[in-house]
Structure formats: structure tokens, C-alpha cells
Image (cartoon, helix red, strand yellow):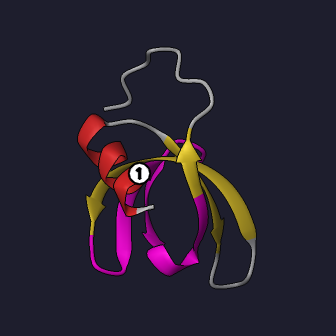
Amino acid sequence: MNGLLRSSKDEKMPIEIMYISEKGEISHRTIVVKEILDSHIKAFCLSKQKPRIFNKSNILSAAKTRIRNKINYA
């Protein structure tokens, strides 16, 4: 997963994550990673159209987006 997070950051490539919140709610997000920290990542959430901070341990899965359509998300 760390390699995929780095690729998102370096290439400004969106990725999809399944995330469980502190309240136990599971959500599907499309994000572009901006910064990788020890226990968190800072990302722009395309789903919410806002910057967000995600706890790495709460990311259930991460994958490349299925469709990219050659859009620059920077």
C-alpha cells in the first residue's frame, strides 16, 4: 500500500480507498495524496472536494482508479 500512496503523491494520480472512520463508518473515497506522514496521509479527497487527513491504520484497501480519462488532478 505504501508504494501506491507514494505513486499517487509523486504522479498526482488519484487512487481509490476504502476507509473506516473513528466512528466505525466505512466509506469509499477517491483521493490524491499530498503528503505521507508516519501514521497519517494528507490528501485531497475528490469525493468531498476538500483536503482531508486519513489515518493509515484505518485504510482498509487502496487501488488505482479504474478510469482516469487523462485528467490532471494537480
> Residue at coordinates 74% horizontally, 68% vertically from top-left?
26
Query: What secondary structure prevails in the magenta region?
Result: strand
Q: Give the residue furthest to the right.
A: 25
Category of crowding for the residue at label 1, using alpha-carbon neighbours closer than 10 angstroms: few (below 14), some (14–19), many (at least 20): some
* Residue 17 as seen in the image, left or right of residue 23: left
Q: Can residue 49 be seen in this view?
A: no
Residue 67: x %, y % from top left: 60, 24
Question: Looking at the rendering, in which quadrant would you find the C terminus?
Answer: top left
Residue 57: x %, y % from top left: 51, 80
Amino acid type shown at disc 1:
Leu
Q: What stretch is highlighted in magenta?
A: 37-61
Residue 19: x %, y % from top left: 63, 66
* Residue 16 as seen in the image, left or right of residue 56: right
Label 1 sits on a secondary structure element that is: helix
Q: In this view, does 62 lie above or below 7?
A: below
Which residue is the site of mark 1? 4
Residue 3: x %, y % from top left: 35, 55
